Amino acid sequence: MDSESREIFNPKTGSLISRDPQSESNFEALIGEILHQSIKKRKTIAEELSELTGVRVTEGMLNDWLAPSKPAARFPASLIKALCELTGDDRLARALLPERPTAALNFGEDVIDARNKLEKILAASKLLCDVRSLSPEKPLALSNLASQSRRRKKR
């Protein structure tokens, strides 16, 4: 079976699995984007992947896995979690999730964002209440200090 075939054989199940070249190229493009956006160089990422997983990874292997001219070379799924950890980017792992877990993650992130916004609003409202609770003498005293300071500078 050649690399351009739309089906691949799964030896565990003994059946053919549909292969989507577009999905594979999107996956490879995403890995390339993650590596490009990382502050770490590919060589460093390869070394750290090796250390973290115990699987020998070189910069050349990373390049081969992403090269459209090398269709037989594929990024191993066993390295996805480690790559996400090393780069701090979980888009690759999330791209592999089915719709329901992805929706649940997105919902959870929306809840966290809303909570953070509410905490900021609460802090601002407490500050406003503190300002309103000041006695009239205190703001007056502060303005008097400012006036006195300006008068001293004029002399």
Image (cartoon, rainbow, N blue to C red):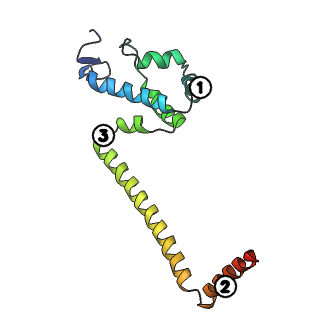
- Amino acid on which the number 3 mark rests in the picture: Pro
* Pick the front one: 1 or 85: 85
Query: Which residue shows up at 33% across the image and 23% down it?
Result: 25
User: Mark 1 belongs to which amino acid?
Assistant: Thr
Residue holding disc 3: 98
Q: Secondary structure at mark 3?
A: loop
**CB-based contact (under 8 Å), mark 2 and mark 1:** no
Per the image, label 1 sits on a secondary structure element best described as: helix
The residue lying at 39 percent from left, 59 percent from top is 111
Check the image and report above or below for 104 versus 35. below
As measured in the structure, the alpha-carbon distance from the residue carrying label 3 to the one carrying label 2 is: 65 Å
Above or below — where is 27 with respect to 60? below
Quarter of the figure with the N terminus: top left
* Residue drawn at (36%, 28%) of the image: 27
Tell me if 149 is positioned left or right of 130 in this view: right
The answer to which of marks 1 and 3 sits earlier in the sequence is 1
Q: CA distance from mark 1 to mark 3?
A: 31 Å
Neighbor class of circle 3 (other Cα within 10 Å; few <14, some 14-19, many 20+) is few
Of the 4 image quadrants, the one containing the C terminus is: bottom right
The residue beneath circle 2 is 144
Q: Position of residue 41 (x, y in %)?
A: 56, 26
